């Protein structure tokens, strides 16, 4: 049976489920255990992500967490792209990996905010899209040194870049959903930014 001829909805559901399990690998926790660091959910913001791992003072662990969280979004999407799967399936796979990071089944559904994983997914959708979104994040992070502000700006920019560059399609819908979820997961950070209480990059 040719997988590309399978019912698109069934293929999308199956792809999303597999990607969800991949996304559920919370590398902030896994890497912290490998480096014998405290559980990132027990200090700082309590968020199992690269930024909070950086607060442990171990830059190598934070960089490895960032890389692995991005790859778990990028690799499933790229595999789907190389297999020639339809855009609905590719979009579902990207969204599945992202949701797995937010609510990981292997870690009591206590996940991160999804910034690195979303970046990986967007790079898989289109290198230019991911590159422009990452440039937006980097610019804001360098200028203001707030990871959360950079993430929020990038989340707002992603759907706009996608629509203007590639129009409306399943990948655009997936990008919009990821952006909305990412903004929602940063609710506490938004309140801290407004109150002037948000921690800057590298600050413990």
Image: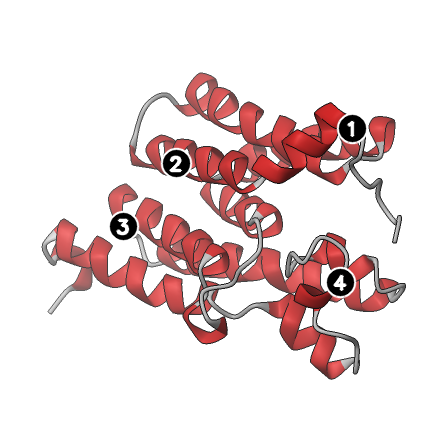
The answer to whether mark 1 and mark 4 are in CB contact below 8 A is no
Q: Residue 186 vs residue 57: left or right?
A: left
Q: Residue furthest front?
A: 195
Of marks 3 and 1, which one's residue comes earlier in the chain?
3
Q: Secondary structure at mark 4?
A: loop
The residue that appears at 56% across and 31% down in the rendered structure is 155
- The residue beneath circle 2 is 177
Is 64 or 81 nearer to us in this picture?
A: 64
- The residue beneath circle 3 is 89
- Vertically, is 159 above or below 60? above
- The residue beneath circle 4 is 43
How is the protein colored in the picture? secondary structure
Of marks 2 and 4, which one's residue comes earlier in the chain?
4
Of marks 2 and 1, which one's residue comes earlier in the chain?
1
- The residue beneath circle 1 is 139
Image depth: mark 3 or mark 1 in front: 1
Image depth: mark 2 or mark 4 in front: 4
- Spatial CA distance of label 3 from label 1 is 32 Å
Image depth: mark 4 or mark 3 in front: 4
Q: Residue furthest top?
A: 164
Q: Is residue 132 visible?
A: no
The x and y percentages for residue 167 are 37, 21
Q: Residues within 10 Å of mark 3 (few under 14, many from 20)?
A: many
């Amino acid at each position: 049976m040719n997988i590309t001829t399978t019912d698109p909805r069934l293929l999308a559901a199956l792809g999303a489920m597999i990607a969800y399990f991949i996304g559920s690998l919370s590398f902030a926790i896994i890497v912290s255990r490998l480096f014998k660091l405290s559980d990132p959910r027990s200090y700082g913001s309590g968020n199992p992500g690269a930024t909070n791992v950086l607060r442990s003072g171990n830059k190598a662990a934070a960089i490895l967490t960032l890389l692995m969280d991005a790859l778990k979004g990028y690799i499933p999407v790229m595999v789907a792209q190389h297999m020639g799967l339809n855009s609905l399936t590719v979009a579902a796979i990207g969204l599945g990996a992202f949701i797995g990071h937010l609510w990981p089944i292997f870690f009591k559904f206590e996940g991160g905010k999804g910034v690195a994983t979303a970046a990986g997914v967007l790079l898989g959708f289109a290198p230019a899209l991911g590159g422009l979104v990452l440039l937006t994040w980097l610019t804001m992070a360098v200028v203001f040194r707030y990871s959360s502000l950079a993430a929020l700006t990038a989340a707002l920019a992603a759907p706009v870049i996608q629509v203007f560059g590639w129009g409306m399609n399943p990948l655009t819908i997936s990008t919009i959903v990821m952006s909305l979820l990412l903004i929602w997961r940063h609710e506490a950070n938004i309140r801290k930014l407004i109150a002037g209480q948000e921690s800057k990059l590298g600050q413990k």
